[in-house]
Image (cartoon, rainbow, N blue to C red):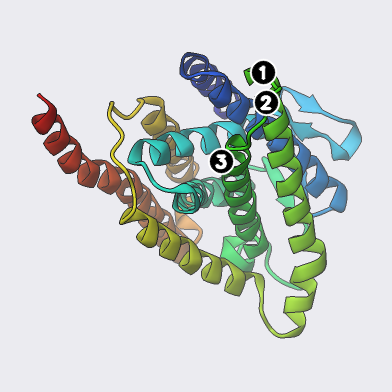
Amino acid sequence: MAETSLYVLFLFCFLHARKKGPTAVAYLLGGVLFGLVLEYMEVMIGNYTYGRFWVMLGRNHRDIPLCIGVAWGIIMYSARLLTDWLGLPLWAAAAFDTLLALNIDFSIDVVAYRMHMWHWDWSYMSANPLTAQWFGVPFGNFFGWQTVVFCYSAFSRLFAGMNLRRETGAIKNAFTTFLAINCSLVVLFTSEEKISPKLAHFGITSAHRVLLMCAFLFALVAYGWRHRHIVTGSLPGIARVVPFWFHLLFAAFFFALGFYSENTAMTLAVIINFAIGALLHALPVLSASAPRSALNARTT
């Protein structure tokens, strides 16, 4: 059910992107490709292995599910629809994209891990794999989400503004998406392999980096909110459907499969995260409706 729903959501996102234009299509497909590449990279490093899905890419225990790349693509695409509609400046938009995606991942990971969709490697620690760090999910995973979404969102917007006079729209979009993916991969690899080990020597753990990054992202959003511009038109429905479906589906799994009885703190965290997700999507829409209504009144 979960895998099939991702392909259905991707189809709706793709149909919307086609109507929106080639830049939107490139961003969606680039997100899927980026997701597949980074997932393969993480599996090769040995951070985790995947369970069995209908469509797998690769061989033996180093194969990855196609639907996971699709999930990356539609999450980042739907988040950008909201931030574009809000009219946030580049860095604030990338920051808000990241917070929206991170909120979804908090709903997914704890449940999917317990459903054996993937398996984290806890062999290097003498810890309970169901309670270590974030209820069995390494904090480094969330910092990875922050890095991936922020970089892809920011680089895509930056490179889209490049002046390529000799290139056609399709070539320019493919080129800028290629640049965004590769620059994001460089940042991700540098962060994981070069910077993180050095920070660990100073006692700065993955949990610290996640919290510091969240503070940085909220600061960017707060600053950018005061400098946003009014965008006419309504918020696309797919921008609401994608996050709602992820939260609803994995919350249903969480309670239907009895995971709530495992850990009271985890259950409370799941409920709070669900509420935060509702606020992240509801408050911007409600606060943006007032100036849009006022603008419409002045122009009619």
Amino acid carrying mark 2 in the image: Lys
Q: Which part of the image, by quadrant, shows the N terminus? A: top right
Q: What SS does tag 1 mark?
A: loop
Q: At 76% from the left edge and 69% from the top edge, which residue is drawn?
A: 195
Amino acid carrying mark 3 in the image: Arg
Labelled disc at residue 157: 3
> Closer to the camera, 222 or 281?
222
The span from disc 2 to disc 3 (Cα, nearest Å) is: 13 Å
Q: Earlier in the sequence, mark 3 or mark 1?
A: 3
Q: Are marks 1 and 2 in contact (CB under 8 Å)?
A: yes
The span from disc 1 to disc 2 (Cα, nearest Å) is: 6 Å
Residue farthest along the front direction in this orientation = 165
Q: At 37% from the left edge and 48% from the top edge, which residue is drawn?
A: 277
The span from disc 3 to disc 1 (Cα, nearest Å) is: 18 Å
Q: Read off the residue under disc 1.
A: 168
Residue 126, percent across and down? 76, 73
Q: Earlier in the sequence, mark 2 or mark 3?
A: 3
Q: What SS does tag 2 mark?
A: helix
The relative height of residue 139 versus residue 228 in the rendered view (above or below) is below
Asked if residue 105 shows in the view, the reply is yes
Q: Nearer the viewer, mark 3 or mark 1?
A: 1
Labelled disc at residue 172: 2
